[in-house]
Each structure stands twice: as structure tokens, then as C-alpha cells.
Image (spheres, rainbow, N blue to C red):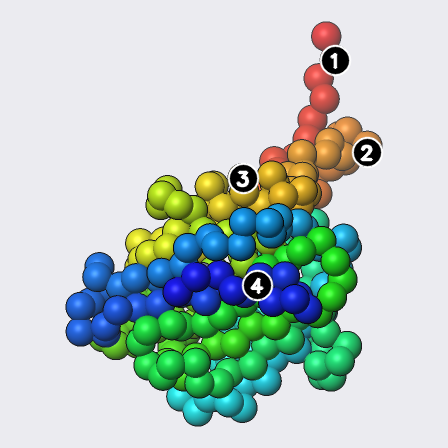
Amino acid sequence: MGIKVNPDAGILCGGCSVDSGDRGPDGMEYCAQTMTASQFVPARWPMDDLTYFVDPSGQSVMPAAEVLKAFETALQAYSDRFVLSFTRVMNPRDANIAIRFGRIDGPSGVLAQSHVADGTRRQKQQTYDLERWVDSDRPGRGQIDLGRVIEHEWGHVMGLLHFTPPVGGLMDPSYSLDVPTLTDKDIAAMVKLGYVLRERQRPIPPANPGQGAGAELLFNTETKVIYAPEPWTLKRR
Ligand SMILES: [Zn+2]
């Protein structure tokens, strides 16, 4: 399925498909998408703070709260790494990105569709098909990991297209249980689009050396590992 041109909101990814649940994870095709809109040039959103609306009512396999949680977790993969924030709103008219669940082609086949960022503030939309969704890194047979699909679709709505040929990234055409989240390749593609990486904060010496015991230094915002350093002592020669 090719990318469709949507005159109102850029292009639509019609991919993200599985051939058949019977073939197992290794045989799944994530997206069968090909680039056909040659004039379309994806471009990053003009702002860093985006709003989204999710209507989980179109599906019935996951409780609404779990669906919302899956979005929150998947989007955090982006906001943890990039200077971006995503706020869920209760009114679709207030949303930069409006998300719904609804039938595309039923279980298997196409999993989801997403508009691709086009450099404007115009609302983008995503539709997630009626799959056997589950929010798990180890989905059962015939189940589809919603979090992984959200992260992939979010790449599109931020302006990423598929890697063709595949590079082992989340934005590859293949749904792979080996790639649960953004890889360095996906992150590099985001940077190329103009998104700004959050700087890893360097350890800041205590303002008053010698009295720094107990100060907490944040070394790594990506994994949220907080180190409590040894008491800081300054030796004079
Ligand atoms: Zn896709």
C-alpha cells in the first residue's frame, strides 16, 4: 500500500501491515509502504509542544486506561530524547494530533495509518485498526504490540518515512519483535529533520566543595539514572 497524498494534511502512511498472524513474528510485514508522493517533503513541526487526543472507544480489546497508558509510554520515548512535549487533551479540536481506533481492514493486513508532518500546524490524524492489541514487549501469537506500533506511527506523525532498504530501525518496513523502541538510526533521522536532542546533563560540582555530601547529580536523562556521588572533597596541594 502506498503513501497517499492528503491535500489537507500532507501524506498518509498506509502501511504498517502484517501478512498473517499465522506466520509468527519473524514473518510479519510492518509496513508495505512505498513512497509515491514524489513532491512531498516531510518537515518537522514548527513547535516543540504538541497536543494529542485519543479516542480509544473504537476498539474493545484493551481497557481505555491501558490504551492511554500505552500512548503515554510510547510518546515518552520521544520526549525523553528530544526537546518535545506531548500533552493529551480532552477535545479533538484542541489537538495537533487526533487519534482514533476504527476498522481499516480488520485484523492483520494494515495495522495503522498516520499523516506525516509537513512543517505546518495543521492537525494530523492517525487511525489504529481493529487488531488484537496488547501492550507488551512479548505479545502472544496473533497479538500486536500496541506500544511498538504507536512509536512507529509517531515517527511518521513527526515527519519520518520508512527506511528503505531496512536498516534495523523502528521505522523499518518490518514489524520486528527485535526492535521494541527507537534505535540510533531513528534518532539520527529525527535529528536530521531538525528535532533537538535533550542534552545529557553533565554532573555539576557542588557549589560549595567540601559540603557536597548527599548532592544528587543527574547524569543520564535517557535512563533517568540518578547517582548520589561520594562526598566531594577538595584537596589543596
Ligand atoms: Zn509505517
Q: Do the residues labelled 4 and 2 touch (CB within 8 Å)?
A: no
Task: Kindly identify which residue carries mark 1.
Answer: 236
Q: What quarter of the picture does the N terminus occupy? A: bottom left
Q: What residue type is labelled 1?
A: Arg
Distance, label 3 to label 2, CA atoms, is: 35 Å
Q: Residue at x 44, y 91 (%)?
A: 60
Task: Specify the quadrant that holds the C terminus.
Answer: top right
Q: Foreground residue, 154 or 136?
A: 154
Decide: is 212 above or below 160: above
Q: Which of marks 1 and 4 is in front?
A: 4
Gap in angstroms between the C-alphas marked 1 and 4 = 68 Å
- Amino acid at the residue labelled 4: Val
Q: Where is residue 118 in the image (x, y as percent from the top left)?
A: 67, 56
The residue tagged 2 is 207
Could you tell me which secondary element the residue under label 3 belongs to? helix
User: Looking at the image, can residue 1 be seen?
Assistant: yes
**Which residue was labeled with disc 4?**
5
Q: In this view, does 189 lie to the left or right of 23?
A: right
Residue positioned 76% across, 62% down in the render: 121
Name of the residue lying farthest toward the left: 23
* Rendered image quadrant of residue 112: bottom left
169 lies above or below 99: above
**Viewer-side label of 3, 2:** 3
Marks 4 and 3 close (CB-CB < 8 Å):
no
Disc 1, disc 4: CB below 8 Å?
no
Q: Which of marks 4 and 3 is nearer the N terminus?
A: 4
